[in-house]
Image (tube, rainbow, N blue to C red):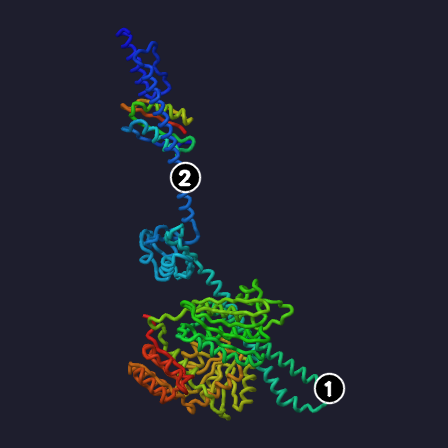
């Protein structure tokens, strides 16, 4: 091969290679013949390299395209999700496992009146108030269940916060959703107010109906029927029927009263208008009290009540009267639906709860109905054949009460075999004293309600002034009180009442609250502020339930219509005979000033007061003096275990304890 | 209707970076949008022409621009 030919081949190879470098990938490789130096092979190798480069270029492009597309979709998704967050009607935040706020939406910021700087990346515990923080705390520590709670929002609004753990194989923090429920609350409040008003208004006519029906029954039985000497069967039958009918009017009137009271009760609970006490309580004692209160029911039906209360149960915290009400409701229900056999009340401890069960051997409840029994106005069973008794509100009230105490209530039952209603309440925390400080007014009220219990013989010839704008009620009071031996004067409004009180000075005043011209509260305030009349006892008898206000003014008893005549007469006796009965009170406090203040105010009210300054003296003094009530500092009580010591002392089983705490710090 | 014109400065980048950049941006372009690219890689013109053929986009024009090449691609 000549040099010229060789140079030409090399030049053509170089041109081919340059073309490849300029990305002329489809160019045909160099082909020569003959090919003593294997140039064709070299050229093919270059062609192969070029094609491989071109392929990888296209693959790289495809990869970049796929990545960019995925990124774009993610971005779009993120934009879409952000738009959802930003346009949500509810407030939302997310908190990471370390407690930092990672996501929040504009509604949340405006609900709590926060700026994004105040919240972005901050710890939730620094950014929010205690109500929301404690809800989040719970979910962050439990990492399990969703919890809900009410929180305060800006401008006095109320929100419902739902805190949900974010679980995706592992715990990723939590989501907080806040819904503004201010309007719902308002509507709920209006509904409750409506129910309260209607129920209150029903009480006034019911007072007359029930009161007079009772008077008629008594008159008939005492004065009229005995005079009918005829043997005429028709007349005798008519007498029996009249007697039976009037009995029905009374029992149905009482049922209606109970219904109204229950409706009011549950309406108040739902509206959060109930004042709940927080006392340290023993489950055994509550069961005993409920058992005593329901003993008559057992006698009527010939049933037996068994109690199985575990020894050494820890205390619970709550409102004694309300919890007794729960057990009474459960026991009365059990009695109602059990015709033979036993009713067993058990109390036992399980983990950190006390479980109280009321077990009967009655008709039982079908499984499908078990949840419905706690709904309002739902009485399960055949309503056409079974005569409905009760209000249908007993169990819903129980549910409200138990849930308010942080507990739960449920039923296990089998048709024909019986039912077991149980509720669980958390055990009282041992550390610290959870007794709230006692307000002096409430304290004095408790004194008034509990001390002078023993009625003295009625003192006849005393004058009572009945103040009510409703002539029927005045007439009813007149008849009842005169029958009990009192003289009765009447006043139809507040101004007339004040004039009569100043001129005639009655021994006791029965006072309505809602009257034209002047309310009963104002009348009471005038009387209790005038030294000449301040010692005349006042019993308020009203459809309005505002005991707090009444006791603040200084009235002595607060009864609601429709009145229970026996209760009214008993209260009148107690108040009129005050001063004759001197109940003994033991005051215990390490602080001498407190002891002195309480002792003096009690002595001024006519109580017999003894006092000591420490726990061990208290036990000795209590054993020696046998007081009716012990008022003591909660710290002394805890330190000396006084309740347990004194409860087993003869003559002190029924002593009433009032504890004064420092309140929660 | 005025179309959005996006720009990409790929000067200093060697093959295949400029066309990969175009590919990444292409995902976000809507039909009718125009991408103006300037690049100084020697194979750019060839590459962008091939790219347009491959991806069925219109190369509106390509011209010299002070030692580099500038072009517009319509999507």
Residue A158 at what x, y percent from top left? 41, 61
Disc 2 is placed on an element classified as helix
Q: Is residue B74 visible?
A: yes
The part of the image, by quadrant, that contains residue A138 is: bottom left
Residue A274 at what x, y percent from top left? 45, 71
Q: Which residue position is annotated with label 2?
A: A73
- Residue A465, compared with residue A419, is above or below; it is below
- Quarter placement of the N terminus of chain A: top left
Of A193 and A69, which appears nearest the observer?
A69
Letter of the chain that mark 1 sits on in the rendering: A
- Going from N to C along the chain, the mark reached first, 2 or 1, is 2
The part of the image, by quadrant, that contains residue A250 is: bottom right
- From mark 2 to mark 1, how far is it between C-alphas? 97 Å
User: Which labelled disc corresponds to residue A233?
Assistant: 1
Residue B41 at what x, y percent from top left? 29, 25
Letter of the chain that mark 2 sits on in the rendering: A
Disc 1 is placed on an element classified as helix
- Residue A618, compared with residue A186, is above or below; it is below
Residue A262 at what x, y percent from top left? 52, 72
Q: Residue furthest front?
A: A36
Are there few (<14), some (14-19), or many (20+) residues within 10 Å of tag 1? Answer: few
Q: Is residue A515 visible?
A: no
- Residue A179, compared with residue A515, is above or below; it is above
User: In the rendered view, does A330 fall on the left or right side of A22?
Assistant: right
Are there few (<14), some (14-19), or many (20+) residues within 10 Å of tag 2? Answer: few
- Quarter placement of the C terminus of chain A: bottom left
Of A162 and A153, which appears nearest the observer?
A162
- Residue B30, compared with residue B49, is above or below; it is below
User: In the rendered view, does A339 fall on the left or right side of A509?
Assistant: right
Of A280 and A593, which appears nearest the observer?
A280
């Amino acid at each position: 091969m000549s040099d010229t030919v060789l140079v030409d081949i090399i030049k053509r190879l170089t041109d081919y290679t340059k073309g490849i470098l300029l990305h002329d990938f489809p160019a045909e490789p160099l082909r020569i013949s003959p090919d003593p130096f294997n140039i064709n092979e070299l050229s093919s190798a270059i062609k192969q390299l070029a094609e491989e480069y071109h392929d990888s270029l296209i693959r790289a492009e495809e990869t970049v395209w796929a990545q960019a597309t995925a990124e774009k979709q993610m971005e779009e998704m993120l934009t879409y999700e952000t738009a959802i967050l930003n346009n949500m009607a509810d407030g939302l935040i997310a908190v990471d496992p370390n407690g930092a706020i990672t996501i929040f939406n504009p509604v949340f910021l405006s609900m709590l009146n926060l700026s994004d700087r105040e919240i972005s990346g901050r710890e939730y515990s620094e950014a929010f108030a205690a109500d929301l923080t404690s809800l989040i705390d719970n979910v962050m520590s439990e990492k399990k269940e969703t919890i809900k709670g009410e929180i305060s929002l800006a401008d006095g609004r109320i929100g419902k916060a739902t805190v949900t753990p974010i679980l995706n194989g592992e715990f990723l923090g939590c989501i907080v959703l806040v819904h503004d429920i201010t309007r719902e609350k308002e509507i709920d409040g209006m509904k409750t107010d409506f129910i309260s008003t209607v129920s209150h208004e029903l009480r006034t006519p019911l007072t007359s109906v029930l009161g007079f029906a009772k008077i008629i029954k008594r008159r008939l039985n005492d004065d009229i029927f005995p005079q009918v000497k005829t043997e005429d069967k028709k007349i005798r039958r008519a007498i029996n029927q009249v007697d039976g009918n009037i009995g029905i009017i009374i029992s149905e009137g009482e049922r209606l009263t109970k219904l109204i009271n229950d409706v009011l009760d549950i309406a108040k609970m739902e509206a959060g208008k109930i004042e709940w006490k927080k006392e340290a309580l023993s489950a055994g004692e509550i069961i005993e009290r409920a058992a005593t209160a329901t003993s008559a029911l057992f006698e009527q039906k010939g049933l037996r009540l068994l109690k199985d209360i575990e020894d050494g149960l820890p205390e619970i915290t709550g409102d004694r009267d309300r919890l007794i009400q729960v057990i009474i409701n459960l026991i009365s229900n059990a009695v109602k639906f059990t015709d033979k056999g036993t009713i067993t009340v058990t109390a036992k401890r399980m983990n950190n709860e006390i479980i109280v069960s009321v077990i009967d051997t009655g008709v039982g409840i079908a499984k499908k109905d078990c949840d419905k029994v706690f709904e309002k106005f739902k009485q399960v069973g055949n309503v056409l054949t079974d005569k409905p008794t009760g209000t249908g509100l007993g169990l819903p009230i129980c549910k409200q009460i138990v849930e308010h105490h942080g507990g739960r209530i449920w039923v296990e039952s089998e048709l024909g075999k019986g039912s077991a209603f149980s509720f669980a309440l958390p055990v009282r925390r041992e550390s610290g004293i959870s007794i709230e400080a006692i307000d002096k007014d409430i304290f004095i009220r408790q004194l008034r309600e509990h001390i002078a219990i023993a009625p003295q013989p009625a003192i006849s010839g005393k004058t009572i002034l009945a103040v009510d704008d409703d002539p029927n009620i005045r007439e009813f009071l007149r008849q009842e009180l005169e029958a009990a031996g009192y003289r009765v004067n009447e006043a139809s409004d507040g101004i007339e009442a004040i004039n009569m009180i100043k001129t005639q000075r009655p021994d006791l005043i029965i006072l309505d609250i809602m009257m034209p011209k002047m309310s009963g509260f104002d009348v009471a305030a005038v009387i209790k502020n005038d030294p000449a009349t301040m010692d005349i006892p006042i019993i308020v008898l009203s459809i309005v339930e505002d005991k707090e206000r009444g006791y603040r003014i200084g009235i002595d008893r607060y009864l609601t219509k429709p009145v229970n005549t026996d209760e009214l007469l008993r209260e009148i006796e107690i108040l009129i005979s005050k001063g004759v009965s001197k109940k003994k009170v033991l005051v215990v406090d390490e602080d001498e000033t407190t002891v002195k203040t309480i002792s003096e105010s009690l002595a001024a009210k006519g109580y017999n007061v003894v006092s000591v300054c420490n726990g061990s003296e208290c036990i000795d003094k209590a054993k020696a003096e046998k007081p009716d009530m012990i008022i003591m500092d909660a710290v002394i009580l805890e330190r000396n275990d006084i309740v347990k010591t004194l409860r087993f002392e003869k003559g002190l089983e029924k002593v009433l304890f009032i504890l004064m705490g420092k309140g929660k710090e | 209707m005025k179309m959005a014109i996006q720009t990409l400065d790929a000067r200093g980048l060697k093959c295949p970076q400029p066309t990969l950049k175009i590919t990444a941006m292409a995902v976000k372009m809507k039909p009718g949008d125009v991408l103006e690219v300037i690049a100084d890689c020697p194979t750019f013109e060839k590459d962008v022409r091939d790219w347009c053929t491959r991806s069925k986009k219109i190369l509106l024009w390509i011209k010299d621009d002070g030692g580099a090449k500038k072009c517009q691609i319509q999507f």
